[in-house]
Amino acid sequence: MALTVTALAALAGLLLILPGLGREAKYTIGLYAYPAASLGGGMVLAAAAFRYRGRHRWAWLMMGLGVACWGVAESVYQITLAVAEEVPYPSWADVFYLVGYPMVGAGVLLLPHAPVGHFERARSLLDATVGAVGISLVAWITYLDRVVTFDGEASFLENWVNALYPIGDVLLLIAVMALAFRKSEHRFGLEFLLVGAALLMNAAADMVYLPLVNADLYWDGMWLDGVWLLAYACLAATAWVILQPPRPVADPHSRHLRRLLIPYVPVAALPVIIAVQSDLRARYLTLFTAVLVGLMITRQWMATREVREITERQRDGILASVSHEMRTPLTAVQGYSQLLNGDWAQFDESERRQMVGDIEDQAIHLGRVITDIIDLTRGKTSSVRLDRSQQCVAGVLERAVRALPSASQARVTIEADSQLTVDADRDRLHQIVVNLLTNAVRYGKHRILLRVGRDGGDVLFQVHDDGPGVPKRFEAAIWQRFERGAHRRGSSVDGLGIGLPIARALVEAHGGTITQHRSDVHGGACFEFTIPASAPPATSPTPEPRPVQPTFSR
């Protein structure tokens, strides 16, 4: 049925547009083809809507019924003309014509979009608004200002009907703009192209029709009726496309140049139109305004490119930061594995158990590092979960130093009471100390002091190095994600600025604080943090960690 209506409407439209037939023959073709094409196209489109469900169905149904209203209007007009030989103005035909415009426009706006983010949806809405305002201004200057006139001798109703027709054409143009910005779920949205072409032809034909009528140049069956018939052929073809099997799904986040250019085409046309219709002074003003607008658009385009590049760098930074935070525990796992695999027999039972235990600890730590990185990049550091218990500070420090590369362990000196305990999550505290030690190794020169002691009801941890320290202007910035202070650009030192934000989040999750100042020991940087101290045991002290042979000086 849809193909039949498409073929008949297209054939009739071409016969009216192409030369060869006489005026009387074209009038006869238009007399029968126009109501059949408009009413038939609307009905098949409304019927095809039931292929979908929910909002999708209502969108196509509204468009189909709106087109059918135009068909009913044409039928009422022809019947009234045949019976009374003269059609009053306005008539019931005008009612159906005018109702069709908002119904078609509402159907286009109801079409569901592919899922996008809030910012992209807002940006698309803003672009569509720019295009709609531009279309309205262009239409007013070139079209509405001349055809929307209030005749003092005509009735109030006649004047309003005269105004509503061109306003309906502007609604169709805005609907075309909405279609252009719709992110289709399909790779080839042929149905949307057909609907857009039909609405564009309909609106253009309407805009040509009114001046022709005012100049007494229009006659039934002329080429303009052929354009309307081709528009109805496109609508009937849309119904046929809808009834076809689904097409492959495309990426809903794909970007097309048309979505960037289309809304600004009418805006760009405004200076040209104003310049043509204005005096010399207004033309110069328009020219300078156009230049300024062009500069603003260029600036916005450059800002968009910059934001995209920053986003890409942050994405690359997230991926690289995962590698950065995984490298330390993986180094420990690899080192112990090579030792055990190379000469198992040279180690006694206690040493082997300690190495296997360290490998297990580092594997657990690695999993938690990955979770922390994900939380940090998503801004969810406040949701860190802790498994707090009394921890021997000396054991935590020794374990943290063993996690460093072997060549770096000798640079660390520990000053801590072997009986000191702290109420903390063992793995999280280990992660904090390792992050600070890693920074000290990276930015220091030769000496690192890891000092821990009581500070009232807290335990104070300090990491001193002999590096250049943190410049004062970067003291606040270094706690931000992916911020490396003075080493942000062109630095030969590895790092991506994620260790300190993670350490800060974990310290604050423990109820402590972390700060940075100039070291009074080695002259470099000193990072210190506090964790609430645990109460000393009443009888037996907290067991010492497994015996180790540290590779650093004490």
Image (cartoon, grey):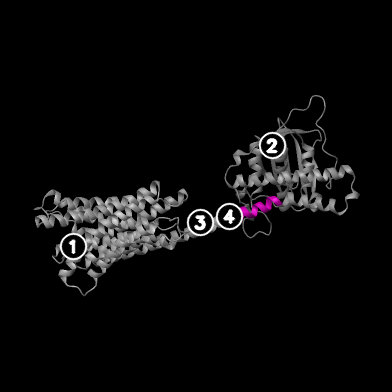
Q: Quarter of the image containing the N terminus? A: bottom left
Q: Is residue 212 magenta?
A: no
Disc 4 packing (10 Å; few <14; some 14–19; many ≥20): few
Q: Residue furthest top?
A: 538
* Sequence-earlier tag: 3 or 1: 1
* Sequence-earlier tag: 3 or 2: 3
* Sequence-earlier tag: 1 or 2: 1
> Which of the two discs, 4 and 2, sits closer to the camera?
4
Secondary structure type for disc 4: helix
Whole-percent x, y for residue 98 in the image: 22, 52
* Sequence-earlier tag: 4 or 2: 4
Secondary structure type for disc 1: helix
Quarter of image, res 221: bottom left
Q: Amino acid at mark 2?
A: Thr
Residue 530 has which mark? Answer: 2
Instruction: Kindly report the distance in space between the C-alpha atoms of the residues bearing marks 1 and 4.
Output: 63 Å
> Which of the two discs, 1 and 2, sits closer to the camera?
1
Bounds of the magenta segment: 313-326
> Which of the two discs, 3 and 1, sits closer to the camera?
1
> Which of the two discs, 1 and 4, sits closer to the camera?
1
Residue 307 has which mark? Answer: 3
Q: Quarter of the image containing the C terminus? A: top right
Q: Which residue is mark 4?
A: 315
Query: From the viewer's perspective, is residue 501 above or below residue 166?
Result: above
Contact (Cβ within 8 Å) of mark 4 with mark 3: no
Disc 3 packing (10 Å; few <14; some 14–19; many ≥20): few
Q: In percent of the image, x 74 and y 33: which residue is there?
A: 422
Instruction: Kindly report the distance in space between the C-alpha atoms of the residues bearing marks 3 and 2.
Output: 38 Å
Query: From the viewer's perspective, is residue 541 above or below residue 73?
Result: above
Of 337 and 296, the residue lying toward us: 337
